[in-house]
Image (cartoon, grey):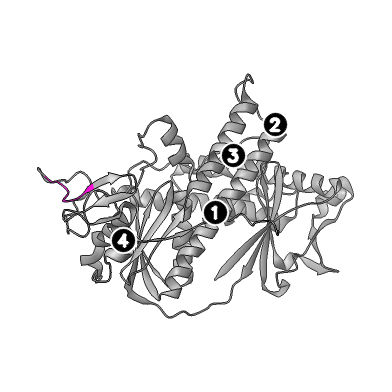
């Protein structure tokens, strides 16, 4: 199992210029490789591999503009893109895809792309990592290498490779390292149902009588601040206007989103480990953001919240901690009453005359046919488990009125009060 850690690169102007140069050359090499791969596909219907591209690009001036092993990784990245395209074609032939797969396309000309260095070509001395540049760069510029500091919280012996990522006029060093495998005692019969939203980002209900809500209000306000700031800066500016200020606030917003995704995913996984829950059921309708029609303002709130990224992160952590991850469509889970055991039709297959036994009294409150008031999102999360309960043989007896009416609220960020 591998982990990664990203660190913002803060260095002198000379090293910054070297990194910009390498990332620019990597971007151009990426486009050259894509061009070759596309031409082979159009003319022969064959899919190129990363090794095919490496062999073809060895005489390319952009390949020789950096360290050979590093530039080879760029070609391999293009090969992976074509490999994914091949897999999508196979799915398309089986009619398991909604859209026709597209051939890998070019990156923006003049942009920057990732530079990857396998560890065997790197050296650590005096807590500085030496990155070689190759003979061609030495001949052109008289420079043989550049150095970046080694993070104090990582072990050099566990590092596998280092990537330099350009993002919003900033550069990050991403350290890929070997992660020790840990075993945790869980029971796959114990399940956590997850319903996602906006104000309540994730609502989680388990069949062991626990329930939590991960707050989304702060996340929503961060997005609103970002949208207002961008609108103010772009006012009376030409189409496509961009500036250092826009890059800075965009990068700040993206960091906050990444932090929120990681925090929320860890909260969910820790809740499972603490209660020995071995299964997660995530309610998700494919393409829901593409067809959302909740009004201009609500659409903006819903689409900009990175819930799909959060779902993927939870799925990754489930694999790491040996927790079973199940994704299911969530149609009618918010309308049907869990305590009344209403039927849950699939999307587009609602029986004529279907009606919920309960009713949503107001935002966040659901009332059953017997007058019991429960949290509306908890009702939806419990119904998400019920969607797959028969197939996965989950016992729903542990989901009672208590966990549906009094979920624990969890904040992603808390403001520390100043000492008196």
Q: Is residue 366 above or below residue 267?
A: above
Q: Residues within 10 Å of mark 1 (few under 14, many from 20)?
A: some
Q: Residues within 10 Å of mark 3 (few under 14, many from 20)?
A: some
State the image quarter where residue 384 is shown. bottom left
3D distance between C-alphas at marks 4 and 2: 48 Å
Q: Of callouts 4 and 3, which one flags the residue occurring earlier in the amino acid sequence?
A: 3
3D distance between C-alphas at marks 2 and 3: 20 Å
Residue 107 disc label? 3
Which residue bears the numbered disc 4?
404
Asked whether residue 137 appears in the rendered view, the answer is yes
Which residue bears the numbered disc 2?
243
Q: How many marks?
A: 4
Would residue 161 be found to the left or right of residue 399 on screen?
right
In the rendered structure, does residue 358 fall within the stretch colored magenta? Answer: yes
3D distance between C-alphas at marks 4 and 3: 48 Å
Would residue 42 be found to the left or right of residue 20 on screen?
left
Q: Of callouts 2 and 1, which one flags the residue occurring earlier in the amino acid sequence?
A: 2
- The quadrant in which the C terminus is found is bottom right
Nearest the eye: 96 or 147: 147
Q: Of callouts 4 and 2, which one flags the residue occurring earlier in the amino acid sequence?
A: 2
> Which region shows up in magenta?
354-359
Q: Position of residue 389 (x, y in %)?
A: 24, 65
State the image quarter where residue 398 is shown. bottom left
Residue 260 disc label? 1
Q: Residue at x 42, y 30 (%)?
A: 296
Q: Position of residue 413 (x, y in %)?
A: 57, 55
Q: Is residue 262 above or below residue 97?
A: below
3D distance between C-alphas at marks 1 and 3: 28 Å
As drawn, which residue projects farthest toward the front?
420
């Amino acid at each position: 199992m591998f982990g990664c850690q990203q660190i913002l690169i803060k260095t002198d102007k000379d090293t910054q210029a070297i990194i910009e140069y390498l990332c620019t050359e990597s971007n151009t090499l990426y486009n050259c490789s894509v061009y070759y791969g596309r031409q082979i596909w159009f003319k022969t219907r064959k899919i190129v591999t990363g090794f095919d591209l490496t062999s073809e690009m060895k005489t390319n001036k952009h390949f020789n503009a950096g360290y050979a092993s590093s530039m080879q990784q760029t070609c391999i990245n293009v090969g992976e893109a074509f490999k994914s395209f091949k897999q999508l074609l196979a799915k398309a032939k089986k009619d398991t895809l909604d859209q026709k797969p597209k051939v890998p396309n070019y990156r923006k000309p003049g942009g920057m792309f990732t530079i990857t260095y396998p560890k065997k070509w790197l050296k650590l001395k005096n807590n500085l990592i030496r990155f070689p540049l190759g003979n061609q760069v030495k001949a052109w510029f008289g420079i043989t290498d550049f150095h970046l500091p080694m993070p104090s919280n990582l072990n050099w012996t566990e590092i596998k490779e280092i990537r330099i990522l350009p993002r919003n006029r900033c550069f990050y060093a991403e350290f890929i390292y070997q992660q020790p495998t840990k075993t945790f005692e869980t029971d796959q019969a114990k399940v956590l149902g997850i319903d996602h939203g906006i104000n309540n980002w994730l609502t989680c209900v388990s069949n062991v009588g626990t329930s939590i809500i991960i707050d989304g209000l702060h996340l929503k306000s961060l997005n609103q601040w970002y949208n207002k700031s961008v609108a103010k800066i772009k006012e009376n500016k030409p189409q496509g206007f961009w500036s250092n200020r826009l890059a800075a606030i965009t990068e700040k917003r993206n960091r906050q989103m990444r932090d929120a995704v990681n925090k929320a995913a860890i909260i969910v996984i820790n809740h499972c480990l603490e209660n020995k829950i071995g299964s997660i059921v995530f309610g998700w309708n494919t393409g829901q953001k593409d067809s959302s029609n909740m009004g201009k303002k609500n659409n903006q709130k819903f689409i900009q919240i990175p819930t799909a990224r959060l779902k993927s992160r939870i799925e990754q952590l489930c694999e790491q901690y040996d927790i079973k991850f199940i994704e299911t469509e969530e149609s009618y889970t918010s309308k049907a009453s869990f305590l009344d055991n209403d039927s849950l039709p699939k999307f587009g297959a609602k029986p004529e005359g279907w009606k919920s036994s309960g009713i949503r009294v107001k935002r966040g409150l659901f009332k059953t046919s017997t007058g019991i008031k429960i949290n509306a999102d908890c009702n939806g999360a419990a119904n998400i488990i019920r969607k797959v309960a028969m197939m996965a043989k989950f016992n729903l007896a542990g989901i009672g009125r208590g966990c549906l009416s009094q979920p624990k609220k969890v904040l992603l960020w808390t403001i520390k009060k100043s000492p008196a």
